[in-house]
Amino acid sequence: MDVPRMYLGGGGTWLEMVHTEGEDWRVTASWYSSLTADFTAFLTVEEVAEFADGMVARLSVPTGARFSARVTPGRNNPLTLTAEPVGERFAFFAWLTPNGDDEVCHLQMEINPADATELADGFAALRAALAV
């Protein structure tokens, strides 16, 4: 089975969330190596599955409207993505919060536009790898 993972971006700006074991997920991001984040997030498979399902639904039938999705609705949310339509593509604004902690620095970054179909396929692959 493939390791469940989500990857957005390319070049100098990217974001990745990878399942490591149990309820541990590694969230890593880089903005041209000037701003980086690398932390463990504690998420259930069900939370990630619901997040992936929501992203697939919105990206598979693009409405041309901006939308936002959180990995988990709880206070410990490590990642929020806001998708901004750019033609047939979406640019993402990522808001990362290590451990959902108010006492740490947040990282907010923009990820260049990517094709909506490719994005939907990527989130569908994440969902399929979760086996729930």
Image: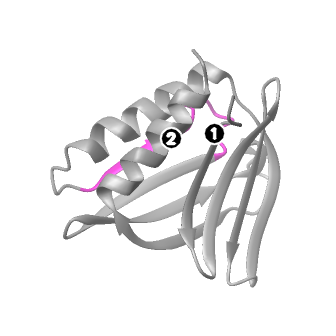
Residue occupied by mark 1: 77
Q: Which quadrant holds the C terminus? A: top right
Q: Residue furthest top?
A: 132
Q: Name the dominant secondary structure of the magenta segment.
A: loop
Name the kind of residue labelled 2 in the image. Answer: Arg
Q: Amino acid at mark 1?
A: Asn
Provide the residue span drawn in magenta: 66-78
Tag 2 secondary structure = strand
> Is-magenta flag for residue 70?
yes
Give the image location of residue 98, x and y in percent.
76, 50
Left or right relative to 36: residue 119: left
Whichever of labels 2 and 1 marks the residue nearer the N terminus, that label is 2
Secondary structure state at the residue bearing disc 1: loop
Q: Residue sitting at 82 percent across and 52 percent down?
A: 39
Residue 127 percent location from the top left of the image: 51, 31
Please give the label number shown on residue 70.
Answer: 2
User: Do labels 2 and 1 touch, CB within 8 Å?
Assistant: yes
Q: Is residue 131 left or right of residue 117?
A: right
Q: How many numbered markers are drawn?
A: 2
Which residue corresponds to the image point at 47% horizontal and 48% vertical from the top-left? 122
Place residue 15 in its image quadrant: bottom right
Decide: is 10 above or below 22: below
Q: Residue 73, can we see it?
A: no
